[in-house]
Amino acid sequence: MAGSVMGKLFMVSTFGESHGKSVGVIVDGCPSQLPLNEEDIQKELDRRRPGQSDLVSPREERDRVEILSGLFQGLTTGTPICMAVFNRDTKPGDYEAIQNLYRPGHGDWTYQQKYGIRDHRGGGRASARETIGRVCAGAVAKKVLARQDVKILGHVIQVGKVSATAFDPEFIEKNPVRCADPEIAGKMADQIRAAQDEGNSLGAIVEVRVTGLPAGIGEPVFDRLDAELARAILSIPSVKGIEFGTGFATAEMTGSAHNDEMTAQGFASNHAGGVLAGISTGQDIVFRFPVKPTSSIRVPQRTVDTEGNEVEIITEGRHDPCIAPRVVPVAEAMTAIVLLDLWMRQKARIF
């Protein structure tokens, strides 16, 4: 496998490039007789697609999914499910002026070093458009997990230096930032617009909460629940770290403060973020991750061309000034894929 496949029982393989004919995914291992249709997938894709608001890329892609295999009479057959989204609003001409330049912050240089060839049109395979396949697969995983009352909720908790303090889950999809704090969401949006007006971008922090996952999910040592989630989240373009529960703040704590004491009513706290020894505790899974500022900006920057000459570059085109709002559904999808795969592996232990 060359890096585009994840999972052992619920297997996901994405394909496609930003300005190619299509992007999509093949899901193998989905349980049979699951009611599934394109609308189940589309509602998740609509949360990820560009053009949702003035805070994201204006690329006009409807991102309509087509399920090409794995269904019969509205039910999954247990065979591979292929889902594709055909690219419509491609403008490769936007990249002609920089096709021989390496864009700072992008994968142009590293892809060239690895493969000896690269698709300069929007980053090709390295583009965040590849995440469409992940969202499609995640929509399937979410539907399976929903049968067990598992819920996955992502939201933006910080943009630039503005942080949320309140949590209203009903408000997340009612604002373009996908922030759960009604008092702070507007301030976050204003910061993003200000960066956009300057031709610049902003970083952010996203949090994901999982409820309803039973204790016992996760494999010892190398396939720990938190390790698998970390691998999945860190594979999302622009993600630069991850923390579970109290996370990096544990460096300032004592063991007596950090340990989640146990009572007859359950755990007294959740500093561990719902995972102990790589296995779910039955508490909420809670983790956060930073999303770097979008690399494509109109601020002049230094770089080199393919001949090694130093030049100045301005990246034109249609780009998000802050990618975090559109990362939320991708992170939820990756979380669902990992949880379902590990749960199926746990089920395989029991006869």
Image (cartoon, rainbow, N blue to C red):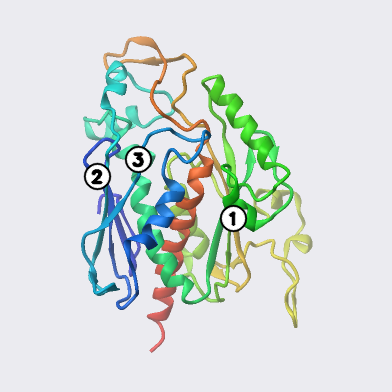
Secondary-structure class at tag 1: strand
Q: Earlier in the sequence, mark 3 or mark 1?
A: 3
**Identity, as a three-letter code, of the amino acid under mark 2:** Ser
Pick the residue in front: 138 or 29.
138
According to the image, label 3 marks what residue?
Answer: 61
Task: Specify few, some or many for label 2: CA neighbours under 10 Å numbering under 14, 14-19, or 20 or more.
Answer: some
The N terminus lies in quadrant: bottom left
Contact check, label 1 and label 2, Cβ < 8 Å: no
Looking at the image, residue 129 sits to the left or right of residue 204; the answer is left
Which of label 3 and label 1 is nearer to you? 3
In three-dimensional space, the C-alpha distance between marks 3 and 2, rounded to whole angstroms, equals 12 Å
- Residue 228 visible (yes or no): yes
Residue 340 % position (x, y) = 42, 69
Which of label 1 and label 2 is nearer to you? 2
Residue 248 % position (x, y) = 66, 48
In three-dimensional space, the C-alpha distance between marks 3 and 1, rounded to whole angstroms, equals 31 Å
According to the image, label 2 marks what residue?
Answer: 22
Residue at the spot 63% in from the left edge and 62% down from the top edge: 273
Pick the residue in front: 52 or 321.
52
Residue at the spot 36% in from the left edge and 56% down from the top edge: 136
Residue 97 % position (x, y) = 30, 16
**Identity, as a three-letter code, of the amino acid under mark 1:** Phe
According to the image, label 1 marks what residue?
Answer: 287
